Amino acid sequence: MRLGIISALQEEQEGLVEAMQAPTTLVHGMRTYTAGDIAGIAAVCVLSRIGKVAAATTATMLIEKLGVTHILFTGVAGAGDARIQVGDIVVAESLLQYDMNASPLFPRYEVPLTGLAYFQSDLHLSNIVADAAAGFLDADFENTIDAAERKDFRLQRPRVHRGLIASGDQFISSPGHINGLNQALSGLLAVEMEGAAVAQVCFELGVPFAVIRTISDNANEAAAHDFMRFVKTVASRYAFHIVMRFCRELAKA
Ligand code: SAH
């Protein structure tokens, strides 16, 4: 197994490259791929940058040029439902591109000529990353996120949710927009800008993948402000500890 680890932003992968044994780097197509061992797993870390095309290109490159056999996307997302709170964690069961619309030629949201709107993540990888997230919240959360930050962001008892993530090339920051998506897409948990693109590439190339997102904002007027602070101070720590737990567990299997 060779695991590709993708994030859009540097903070979403903070500390991982430093935790790698024997790292080597390849710069290609405006991205830096760092290969090495993380907790006994052969891994390649890379920042995709933001958006579906950037993410799809990066996933393709990881598979075709770096030889990865499995992919984990780790990052932040806006809450897609009122039950989901900032600080909660969402693990994708399926992913959809909410801005895909070739109707009336194809049904709304369907990716033309694949017959699919919803792309399923790999159950085994998703189970392991969901367990890693739950383990982090139970055992590391209180020691890792300091009390002032927990209070500022009202992080009380963060939870892990599993279900639908929707991706599109927009930062969603209005209640009208997020409520409309919530109504149109039953079971929606989170919105972001990369996951469903990675899912399509992995589907087409037959590579198992998982997507995990920490909720950074409520996709409303406060989203941009909340997002910036949260990513720097909180999400970076979630990502590091969860990915380390994930790799340790994978290495046992
Ligand atoms: N202002 C930021 C832009 C970040 S875009 C900057 O200059 O760096 C937001 C990133 O976080 C994307 O990678 C996306 O996947 C995720 N994200 C978090 N909250 C989101 C939201 N409300 N809508 C869409 N994407 C969101």
Image (cartoon, rainbow, N blue to C red):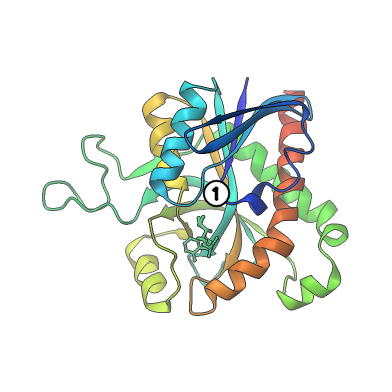
Considering depth in this image, is 116 or 201 the residue closer to the camera? 201
Residue nearest the viewer, comparing 231 with 49: 49
Q: Amino acid at mark 1?
A: Ala
- Mark 1 Cα shell of 10 Å, populated few (<14), some (14-19), many (≥20): many
72 relative to 96, above or below: above
Considering the image in quadrants, where does the C terminus appear? top right
Task: Judge whether 157 appears above or below 152 on screen.
Answer: above
Observer able to see residue 130: yes
Which residue does the image show at 42% across and 39% down from the upper left? Answer: 56
Left or right of 251: which side holds 78? left
Residue at the left extreme of this rendering: 104
- Please name the residue shown 40% across and 25% down the image: 205
Q: Please give left or right for residue 74 compared with residue 93 in the image.
A: right
SS type, badge 1? loop
State whether residue 87 appears in this view. no
Of 27 and 208, nearer the camera is 27
| Residue 87 image position (x, y, % from top left) | 67, 64
Q: Is mark 1 within 8 Å of ligand 1?
A: yes
Q: What residue is pinned by disc 1?
A: 8
Q: Quadrant of residue 77?
A: bottom right
- In percent of width and height, residue 97 lies at 35, 51
Q: Residue at x 18, y 50 (%)?
A: 102
Residue at position x 54%, y 78% from top? 222
Task: Quarter of the image for the N terminus: give it.
Answer: top right
Give the image location of residue 86, x and y in percent.
63, 68
Which of the 4 image quarters holds residue 215? bottom right
Q: Is residue 85 above or below residue 23?
A: below
Q: Quadrant of residue 141?
A: bottom right
Relative horizontal placement of residue 183, taking residue 207 as reference (left or right): left
